[in-house]
Amino acid sequence: MRRLAGQIGAWAAGIAVALIFLAPLEWTVLGSFRAEAVIFQTGLHSWLPPENWTFAHYAAAWRRAGLGPALLVSLAQVAVIAGVGLVVNAPAAYAFARLSFRGRDTLFAVIVMLIILPVEVLAVPMFFTVRDLGLTGGLGPAFTGLTVPFVAKAFNIYFLRQHFLALPVQLEEAAVLDGAGIWTQFWCVALPSITPALATVVLLDLLTHWGDFLWPLLISTRDSTRTVQISLADLFTQPPVRWGDILACAVLATLPVAALFRWFQRYVVATETQAGIK
Amino acid sequence: MTAWQKSFSRRAPLLLLPALGLLAVFVVWPLARAAYWSFTSADLLAPERARWIGWDNYSDLLGDPRFRQAFGNTAIFALLIVPIQTAAAFLLALWINRPEPAWRWLRTVFFLPTIVAMPVLAVVWTVLYQPAEGTEMGLVNAALGLAGLAPRAWLRDPHLALPAIAAMSVWQGVGLQMMVFLAGLQGIPREQLEAARMDGAGPLQRVFHVILPGLRNTVIFVVTVTTILAFRLFVQPYLMTRGGPGNRTLSLVQSIYETTFLNQDLGRACAEALLFLGWVALLTWLQRTAAREERA
C-alpha cells in the first residue's frame, strides 16, 4: 500500500511540475486561437481552451509577416548549412582521423581552438568579408552570404573526427583488401558507420541556425532573404501591435523545426550528449 | 600507420581543402582583420582609411562607463544563470532518472523549450511578462495574482528587468543541461550506489559522496558551457527591452553591435569583440585546467 501511495505521489508531482513548466508554451498556443480582446483575460479562462476558436491571427500573421517566403528562406538556410556542412566537414574530419599529412596535428590544434570562437565576436568583421565578396545584393548572393559562412564548422569537424577515430580500423582494412579506394572507403564504409554522429551534427545545425538572429539582422536587409525570426521580430516591433498575430507567428515559426527535430531525434543516441565532455 | 593509410594520404588535401578554405575565408581572415582594426581608428563606412592608434581603443574601453555597464550586466546575468540553472538541471536529472520507461516523457517536457528558437521565446515571454493594465495582464502576473501577489511591470522596472530575463533564460536552457547530467548519471556504476546504500549512506550522503564526485567533470563542463552561453547574451534583451530601462539590460554583444552601427566606430567595436573573445578563452582555459586536475 505504501509503495503504491509513493508511486501515485511521484506521478502527481511529476504531472504538476510538467504543467507549470509547460504553462508558458500552452498559454502561447491557446492564446494564438483567442480573440484579441480576451488574450490577456485573467482568471481561470486564461488556462482553459478558448470558448470561440479563431484562426484569424494565423491568416493575419501569415500575410503581415510575409511568412510564406520567410519560411522558405529559413528552411533553405538550415538545409544548406546542415547539408553542405556535412559534405564539407565529414571529409576533413576523416582526413584528420585516418590520414597522415604534414602539419596535421598543428592544423587540428587550430581547429580545436576555433571551437570556442563565438559567432558574436566574428559577426562584424565577417560582415565586411561577405560584403567584399559581393554577397549582399540580389537573391542568390544574399542567400549565399546568409549560409556559406557557417557551412564549415570547427566543432563539427572535431566531433566527427572523434567518431571516426572510435571506429575499429579492421572494418576499413577489410574494405581495402576488397580493393576499395579512398572514396569508396569514405562514403561506403566510414560514413555509414557513424550515422548517429552525423544525425547529431545535422540536428545541432538545424536548431542553432533556425534560431539565428544577429547574423540575419546584419545582412538580410532586403525582403527576399528575410528569415522567419527576423519577420517575427518585425511583426513584434513595428506598429500596430496585435498580440494574437504575434503569438500565431511564434507558433508558425516553431512548427517546422519541431517537426524536423521529431524526425531526426530517432537517429540520435542519447549518449551523444556526453561526447563533448571528455 | 598502415600501408593503405599511407597511400590514401596523398588524397588528404582534397578532403581538407573545402573545409579549411571556408574556415580561412570566413573565420580566420575576419578574425585577423578584427584584430588589426582593433588597433586602428577604422570607421564603419571607410575601414580602408584606418589609422594605427595602438592600444587606445582598449584603454578607452576599460574606462568607458557604457562598456563597463554592458560587461557588468552580462556578468550579473551569468552569476544569476549559472548557479541556478546548473543546480536545477542537476536536481531535475536526479529526480527523473528512474528506471520506469514512463518517466521518459518528463525528459521531453523539460527539453521542449530548448528546441524553440530564442527569438521566438523572447517575443513570447515579453507577452507573458506584460504588466497589468486595467483587468488585463500577462500570464506571469496572472499566476502571481493567484498566489495573492501584486502584479509588476517586469521588463520596465530597472531592478527586475535583468532578473526577469535571467528567469526566462533558465527556463529555456535547463532542459539541455539536464540531458547532459542524465548522460553523466548513466556513467556512475550501480554497484557503487548499492555499496553506499549497504553501508548505510542516506540519500543526501549518496548525492554528496558518490554522485557528485562521480559527475565532477560533467559539472565542470556544464558550468563552463553555461557561463560562456550566458556571456553571449544578446537576443533576449535586444528584443524584450532593447537594453533598457536605462541600459540596465545592455549586453556585451549589443554594445558591440551598437558601437559598430550606431557610433560607426569599427575599430572600437573590434576591440570590444576581442576583449570578449579573450574573456571566453580564459573561461575555457579554466575549465580545461580544472577538468585535467582530476585525471592527474
Image (cartoon, coloured by chain):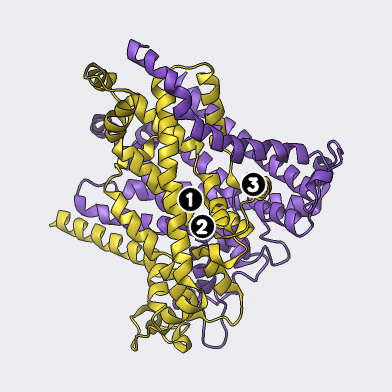
Chain colours: A yellow, B purple
Q: Which label sits on residue B77?
A: none
> Do the dots labelled 1 and 2 sit on one chain?
yes
Quadrant housing the N terminus of chain B: top left
Q: Residue at x 66, y 50 (%)?
A: A131
Q: Find the distance from the CA under tag 3 to the CA under tag 1.
A: 42 Å
Q: Nearer the viewer, mark 3 or mark 2?
A: 3
Q: Find the distance from the CA under tag 3 to the CA under tag 2.
A: 37 Å
Closer to the camera in the image, A261 or A3: A261
Mark 2 — residue?
B169
Judged from the image, the secondary structure of the residue bearing numbered disc 1 is helix
Closer to the camera in the image, A132 or B180: A132
Q: Are marks 3 and 1 in contact (CB under 8 Å)?
A: no
Res. A3 in view: yes
Q: Which label sits on residue B85?
A: 1
Quadrant in which residue A107 is drawn: top right
Q: Count up the numbered dots.
A: 3
User: What chain letter is assigned to the residue under label 1?
Assistant: B
Question: What's the amino acid at mark 2?
Answer: Ser
Mark 3 — residue?
A133
